[in-house]
């Protein structure tokens, strides 16, 4: 008689689910880390070439549109609306049914996106006029921003299709290709900045073209993975398909629910256009925040959604509560030390990576201030992604949408109040405070919906994390206060100083967790040990086969 645990749809022990989530999050995090490193290099290239000039301001305002769409679709609503429904089809129905659903969604989405892209290109002058009211007095900069927006608008088409492909692959627990696709995106932009931009009368146009090429590459590189799994999209124009209708009903409110942070950043961009250089300072400030958020927060939310969706499809709310609490604990474990490190090391990081070429010391100070104001809300940015994933696994997109409306309203009000005394820093702080409000609303409702979350385990985890961050604070404060940062040049010494400080912080942080026998560290370390063990076993097997082959050859 077969083991019930081996049957499709059977419950999986919580410990195994946690290991699965951590393993997937580790894979996504590693790929995202590579992408963020290249993104960092990309930002350094753009800072050196364009600094905080009017051309840079125009590009970053125009780029806010495709960047918003990337973070909404590739890291947000498309997966959140599609994955729970597709997972249900894939788990409870035949594979053919799942393929037909994916193909119907692809065809419907492609048709809509072509129309929206064409309308967007034609409407770009009005869009830019609304997004950059501070540019109205400068017709040349307004025209440049409009043209850049038109060049980059087709990115919407490619990134949305890439997000759909990512949703299919993630649902079948294939995370590598979707996670690595942003690496190709950044490579395309860097290549365009060096190879294409110098050939054009306005170099910044070359970077915009690189954005579109990168979006197309993100979609194309996922197609082989779909083909291998028999899920490559076909042409099925069935907008009336029951699954398509359900995804559509989930998608519209999920756009708002997942978009609160990005909508708030867009509001900041609009208001920042009134201050010279502010769009650039806010862009680079948020880029530094996105580094830990993308590597850990987005990675964990992406990895946990299929698991939550399977548990919800089975009606296993007890398992869902355990997985959700585990996700929140892992967010605290990673994000809180990263938040403190960014706050304390903001000036050295911005100085070391961006203060080159036309990017000045004054630009460094302004960007570092934006980093500080964004960073105080980093824990909220990351936690909201996990909490929203739980709502979407229950196929509830209405509650996150309503919470998002309240958060966006609060952000607008706070931005208007704080931008006077604090200028661009007030806009960044308003975004952080609005995210905290969004998280507070969502977690209160979810706690009631699930009949309670394991707050005791989350609280114990938070206490351990706070104790373990003491070495992070001490090491980061020591690095930030070093005299080397007051010297001109000395880039090698500064690089060594920063990386030594980060190394000491991490060693101290994980060391304290090891002394306290932290459950989170044990899960992560256990996964690493098993991975090393698997590689060692594979190596032994390969050597054994090699020895056998050599013996047979001699005989």
Image (tube, rainbow, N blue to C red):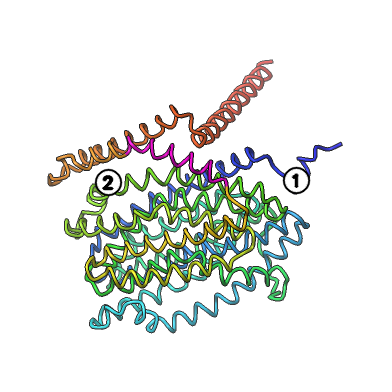
Q: Main secondary structure of the magenta part?
A: helix
* Label annotation for residue 304: none
Instruction: Look at the image and give the residue range highlighted in magenta.
Output: 454-472
* Number of numbered labels in the structure image: 2
Percent x, y of residue 247: 64, 68
Vertical position of residue 298 compared to residue 212: above or below: above
Q: Return the disc, 1 or 2, that comes first in the chain's sequence.
A: 1
> Which residue is tagged 2?
344
- Residue beneath the point at 47% across and 71% down: 405
Element under disc 1: loop
Vertical position of residue 204 compared to residue 138: above or below: above
- Residue beneath the point at 60% across and 46% down: 323
Residue in the foreground of this view, choosing between 433 and 197: 433
> Which residue is tagged 1?
10
Left or right position of 43 against 120: left
Q: Quadrant of residue 161?
A: bottom right
Percent x, y of residue 194: 31, 59
Element under disc 2: helix
Left or right position of 50 against 61: left
- Residue beneath the point at 59% across and 59% down: 391
Residue in the foreground of this view, choosing between 215 and 514: 514
Q: Is residue 471 magenta?
A: yes
Residue in the foreground of this view, choosing between 432 and 357: 432
The quadrant of the image that shows the C terminus is top right
Percent x, y of residue 436: 42, 59
């Amino acid at each position: 008689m077969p083991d019930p645990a081996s049957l499709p749809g059977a419950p999986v022990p919580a410990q195994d689910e946690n290991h699965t989530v951590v393993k997937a999050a580790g894979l996504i995090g590693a790929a995202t880390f590579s992408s963020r490193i290249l993104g960092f290099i990309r930002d350094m290239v753009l800072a050196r070439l364009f600094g905080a000039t009017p051309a840079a301001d125009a590009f970053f305002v125009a780029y806010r549109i495709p960047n918003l769409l990337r973070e909404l679709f590739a890291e947000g609503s498309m997966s959140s609306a599609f994955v729970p429904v597709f997972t249900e089809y894939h788990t409870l129905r035949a594979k053919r049914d799942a393929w037909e659903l994916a193909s119907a969604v692809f065809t419907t989405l492609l048709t809509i996106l072509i129309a929206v892209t064409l309308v967007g290109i034609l409407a770009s002058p009005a869009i830019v006029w609304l997004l950059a009211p501070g540019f109205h007095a400068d017709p040349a900069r307004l025209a440049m921003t409009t043209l850049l927006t038109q060049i980059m608008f087709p990115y919407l088409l490619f990134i949305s299709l890439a997000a759909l492909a990512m949703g299919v692959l993630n649902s079948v627990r294939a995370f590598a290709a979707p996670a690595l696709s942003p690496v190709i995106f950044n490579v395309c932009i860097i290549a365009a900045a060096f190879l294409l931009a110098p050939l054009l009368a306005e170099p910044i146009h070359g970077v915009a073209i690189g954005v579109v090429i990168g979006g197309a590459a993100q979609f194309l590189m996922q197609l082989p993975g779909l083909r291998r799994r028999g899920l490559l999209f076909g042409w099925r124009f069935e907008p009336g398909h029951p699954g398509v209708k359900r995804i559509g009903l989930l998608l519209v409110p999920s756009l708002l629910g997942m978009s609160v942070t990005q909508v708030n950043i867009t509001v900041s961009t609009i208001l920042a256009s009134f201050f010279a250089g502010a769009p650039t300072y806010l862009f680079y400030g948020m880029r530094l925040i996105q580094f830990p958020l993308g590597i850990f927060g987005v990675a964990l939310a992406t990895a946990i959604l299929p698991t939550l969706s399977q548990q919800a499809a089975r009606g296993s709310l007890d398992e869902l509560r355990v997985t959700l609490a585990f996700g929140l604990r892992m967010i605290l474990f990673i994000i809180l030390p990263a938040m403190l490190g960014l706050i304390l090391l903001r000036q050295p990081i911005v100085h070391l990576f961006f203060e080159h070429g036309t990017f000045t010391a004054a630009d460094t100070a302004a960007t570092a201030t934006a980093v500080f104001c964004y960073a105080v809300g980093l824990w909220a940015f990351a936690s909201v992604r996990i909490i929203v994933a739980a709502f979407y696994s229950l196929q509830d997109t209405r509650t996150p949408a309503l919470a998002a409306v309240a958060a966006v309203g609060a952000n607008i009000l706070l931005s208007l109040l704080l931008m006077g005394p604090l200028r661009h820093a007030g806009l960044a702080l308003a975004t952080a405070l609005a995210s905290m409000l969004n998280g507070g609303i969502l977690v209160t409702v979810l706690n009631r919906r699930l009949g309670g979350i394991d707050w005791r385990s989350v609280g114990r985890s938070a206490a351990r994390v706070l104790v373990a961050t003491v070495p992070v604070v001490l090491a980061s404060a020591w690095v930030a206060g070093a005299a080397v940062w007051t010297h001109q040049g000395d880039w090698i010494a500064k690089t060594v100083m920063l990386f030594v400080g980060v190394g000491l912080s991490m060693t101290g942080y994980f060391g304290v967790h090891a002394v306290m026998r932290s459950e989170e560290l044990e899960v992560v370390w256990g996964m690493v040990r098993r991975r090393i063990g698997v590689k060692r076993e594979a190596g032994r097997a390969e050597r054994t086969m090699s020895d056998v082959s050599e013996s047979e050859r001699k005989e």
